[in-house]
Amino acid sequence: MLNTIGILSPGDMGHTVGDVLRQNGLRVITCLDGRSQRTRQLTEKAGIVDVPTYPQFVTEADLILSIMVPAQAMSATSAIAEALQQVDTTLTYADCNAIAPQTVRQLGDIITAAGGMFVDASIIGPPPRTPGATRFYASGPQLDLFSELNNYGLDVRALGAEIGLASAIKMCYASLTKGLTALCTELLTAASVLGISEALTAEFQLSQSALFERMEKGLPSMPPKARRWIGEMEEISATFAHVGLTPNILTGAADMYRFVGETHLADLPPEAHDEFPNLAGLIEILAKNLKSA
Amino acid sequence: MLNTIGILSPGDMGHTVGDVLRQNGLRVITCLDGRSQRTRQLTEKAGIVDVPTYPQFVTEADLILSIMVPAQAMSATSAIAEALQQVDTTLTYADCNAIAPQTVRQLGDIITAAGGMFVDASIIGPPPRTPGATRFYASGPQLDLFSELNNYGLDVRALGAEIGLASAIKMCYASLTKGLTALCTELLTAASVLGISEALTAEFQLSQSALFERMEKGLPSMPPKARRWIGEMEEISATFAHVGLTPNILTGAADMYRFVGETHLADLPPEAHDEFPNLAGLIEILAKNLKSA
């Protein structure tokens, strides 16, 4: 039975998930050890309880959701495994991060070796503020507890008993959305430097209007997320290479997010929509950053 | 005044362009020296006259359109420049190929050094069988003759006096259409190998229906064009690198077309629509080719 959910860590996505679960009747806790001031504020805002130590955290939680940037997933898993070995408790640990299937299998081995149960999970869609917009995919041999989240405001979809399937769907899906965004950012920046922005925009409006509309809507809100997408693109690149496909498209996408991440726009919080430039303004800033490089 | 157009070479795109110009009252010639049997057939079909030597070709033609795969553009330009130096004639040479602006400027220097006038041109859209579907962009200091094609069934749009602008718009445009196709091909192939095709398709139909429809419509007819797109992706990669952006997304797209080009589907002629598999069938073939690699 599900009573207490642990969330690591309550950033933009994590605190919104916690908020939904709390509003649907679950107790939500976290362990903020070493987290940023922004994460502390989001935690308080979402009514999530901060417990002081990892051993206490794994003892109180029935299910822990790991929601963070890919680069932190391994050390978070190790910290939980270490705490699990110090206390006598039953815990299910769900890695919900955008990481390669082959890496998720390693995380699963660490948790099960420490006596926990492991779920491979992934999140497709925005932070679940609007019902119906976000899916939580899950795979693994022990999905019962995670699937119960369906009763607490989340849309959970089970993919099968194999660890790696939930991560795989995330990798392939995000390669389309974020890979396309990287490609569009690159070609519009190149067009600006090459002096053909106006003609290209007219051509896109004529023959690629749906894609151009997507650029106008999607690109301006991307820079605050660019830095954390670098690691995600690298995970997808590793996923594709692992099955024998080229890593280059996605390492190129990582390059683009690294480039965008170096601009001042990447310092804006993701919710500061009023401060985002429009598409033309964004591309102008990127083209200038390129020229000064 | 425009009387005779030379086309090098009358492949899928070139013979259709020649056909349109001929139907609109121009004489259309070519020089098939060393061309394939398929190109000879297309030439006859389009009523294009084959003249035996390059010196005769440049003497009879008022304007030559170079329409071929990127890798051949330089040697075609050199052959025309050589012929120009052997005869006393006035000629405008338009390179219409998908090549990087910095490369087009080199071609321009070769033609002007040989006494010809040079136009940077590019073609956006399919072979111009349907009026309104295809644009011919042009840039350079001497556009008068090329712009006259507007009176003979083509849609010519002048971009300015600088050699490189017409190539730049082609590079940026094709990076979107063919870069996206490469990305979609890769992620669907990966999904198939990773065992999540069905769930990913359902997720795409739910949250990315426009893009998924584009895949269903566009991907099956891609393999017969994959081999000639390799060089085009490499030209775009060089274009982006030249302005300081990452080459990797587009070298990855070239990798994908190289991979597709190794399958038997790449041997089909581009007009053999009845023999193309559907999207699921295409991806199944690609995934199998990957596994056996």
Image: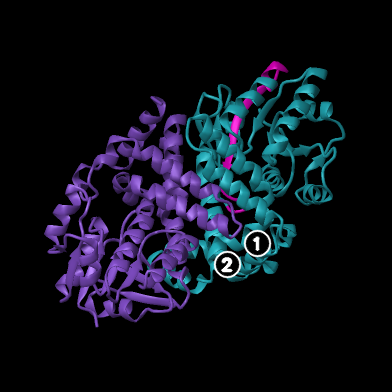
Chain colours: A cyan, B purple
Question: Is residue A241 rendered to the left or right of residue B215?
Answer: right
Does residue A38 appear anywhere in the picture? yes
Q: CA distance from mark 2 to mark 1?
A: 9 Å
Q: What quarter of the picture does the C terminus of chain A occupy?
A: bottom right
Marks 2/1 in contact by CB < 8 Å: the verdict is yes
* Residue B176 percent coordinates (x, y): 45, 57
**Residue type at tag 1:** Leu
Query: Could you tell which of marks 2 and 1 lies nearer the N-terminus?
Result: 2
Mark 1: few/some/many CA within 10 Å (<14, 14-19, 20+): some
Disc number placed over residue A290 in the picture, else none = 1
Question: Residue A81 versus residue B244: which sits nearer the camera?
Answer: B244
Question: Residue A66 versus residue A282: which sits nearer the camera?
Answer: A282
Q: Mark 2, chain letter? A: A
Disc number placed over residue B149 in the picture, else none = none
Q: Is residue B115 above or below residue A156?
A: below
* Residue B180 percent coordinates (x, y): 44, 51
Q: What quarter of the picture does the N terminus of chain A occupy?
A: top right
Question: Is residue A218 rendered to the left or right of residue A225?
Answer: left
Give the residues in magenta: A111-130
Q: Is residue B96 magenta?
A: no
Where is residue A291, by image quadrant? Answer: bottom right
Mark 2: few/some/many CA within 10 Å (<14, 14-19, 20+): many
Q: Mark 1, chain letter? A: A
- Which residue does the image show at 84% across and 50% down from the upper left? A37
Q: In this figure, which residue is indicated by the disc labeled 2?
A: A193
* Residue B172 percent coordinates (x, y): 47, 61
